[in-house]
Amino acid sequence: MKKLKVGIVGVGGISEFHISGYKRNPNVELYAFCDINEQRLKEKGARHGVTRLYTDVNEMVKLEELDAVSVCTWNSAHAPCTIAALNAGKHVLCEKPMAMNGEEAEEMLAAAKRSGKMLQIGFVRRFGNDCAILKDFVDNGDFGEIYYAKAIYTRRHGCPGGWFSDKKRSGGGPLIDLGVHVIDLARYIAGCPKPVSAYGVTFDKLGSRPEVKTRPGEYKASDAGVTSDVEDFASALIRFENGFTIGIEASFDMNLPGENNIVILGTKAGATLSPDLKIYSTAHGYMTNVTLDMPTALDFNGLFEREIDDFVDCVLTGRASNAPAEDGVILMKILSAIYESARTGNEVKIDC
Ligand SMILES: NC(=O)c1ccc[n+]([C@@H]2O[C@H](COP(=O)([O-])OP(=O)(O)OC[C@H]3O[C@@H](n4cnc5c(N)ncnc54)[C@H](O)[C@@H]3O)[C@@H](O)[C@H]2O)c1
């Protein structure tokens, strides 16, 4: 079978996970790299044996034989780089969040439809072992009607700095960066209902607290610097057309321990996903707590590889993606509505 020739746009921190996923996929040839930071571009090229190096995405996508690209730039470059690649006839896997806002996301989807190429969004948590198990139970009807979910992704002190705290390049703080993961996961587990409105608040009470020591190993942007002008904490209620509601909390900085969890409430059972899947139900008039006799905690081993394998398989076989651009647009509309609600103090309608 002909190998898929893949390029990477933006060769910073997360690109390593895409690169290692492509490298171990036997149907892929890692073909070209692009980054506006020439030194990083050369280092990455040398490390991974890639010699076609570009500082301008428009030049890279002129390579006729290039089939697909991963867009791993900071958020403000997702739309221009993705649209340039689609217009040049390449398939795209674009990192989360899809874009800076709902309008940009719609333009990307329109470009994908015009080109007839695949546009997949990096909703990597959909490929988690924990998500797969919970979804098995949900799809088999064990929860009955799911009517509420809590989606929490909070850090006590964990702003990655650099562009993550520069609104012009990120579009926002923990809500758009971390919240996007858990809102998508909760909505995905609940069967992807359509959102109708959001009411949200954001706070900037602590800033990024540079005077507080960061735990070793905390995720950092490739280029540090820039003082923070994004929120440090966000909370919102998102309503869906079937009545399902998500309560979300996300933070980079707060005076409480951080948490990364999804809680779902159904008419037949409820569940907490982290640190291990626990299902709470009733049987024969007794309250029952169910745990599985196997590891159910999110395992990062193999997580990005499954996402990359799915993208490659979709491109090669033409089957639909498990993380389609349509869901990326919906997520961006939800995030934009929450930011708009936080700004105005009103509930904001979402038109999908
Ligand atoms: N899926 C996940 O769990 C996860 C985790 C971390 C980051 N991300 C996402 O990945 C993306 C990148 O984050 P990161 O942590 O790797 O950031 P990073 O700062 O480490 O790397 C970003 C790179 O993009 C390059 N870049 C910016 N604009 C460019 C352009 N127009 N053309 C080419 N290169 C350009 C920068 O020079 C930099 O090297 C973000 O969208 C982020 O939200 C996803």
Image: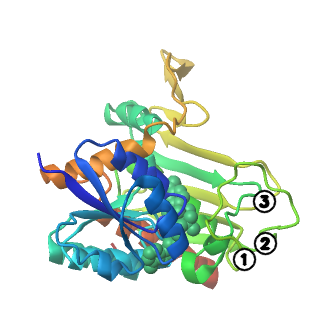
Amino acid identity at mark 3: Met
Instruction: Give yes or no for contact between labels 3 and 2 (Cβ–Cβ under 8 Å).
Output: no
**Numbered label attached to residue 228:** 1
Residue 238 visible (yes or no): no
Q: Closer to the camera, 330 or 95?
A: 95
Where 47 sits versus 119, above or below? Answer: above
Residue 317 visible (yes or no): yes
**Numbered label attached to residue 254:** 3
Q: Is residue 106 left or right of residue 164?
A: left
Amino acid identity at mark 2: Gly
Where 187 sits versus 275, above or below? Answer: below
Question: What is the quadrant of residue 223 in the picture?
Answer: bottom right
Instruction: Give yes or no for contact between labels 2 and 1 (Cβ–Cβ under 8 Å).
Output: yes
Dot 2: within a 10 Å radius of its alpha carbon, few (fewer than 14), some, or many (20 or more) residues?
A: many
- Determine whether the residue tagged by mark 2 lies in a helix, strand or loop: loop
Q: Residue at x 25, y 41 (%)?
A: 26
Q: Closer to the camera, 144 or 329?
A: 329
Q: Which residue is mark 2?
A: 207
Identity of the residue furthest to the right in this view = 211
- Determine whether the residue tagged by mark 1 lies in a helix, strand or loop: loop
Q: Which label's residue is closer to the chain start, 3 or 2? A: 2
Instruction: Name the front one of labels 3 and 1.
Output: 1
Total count of labels: 3
Q: Residue at x 70, y 54 (%)?
A: 155
Q: Which label's residue is closer to the chain start, 3 or 1? A: 1
**Numbered label attached to residue 17:** none
In 3D space, how far apart are the residues under numbered discs 2 and 1 (Cα atoms)? 6 Å
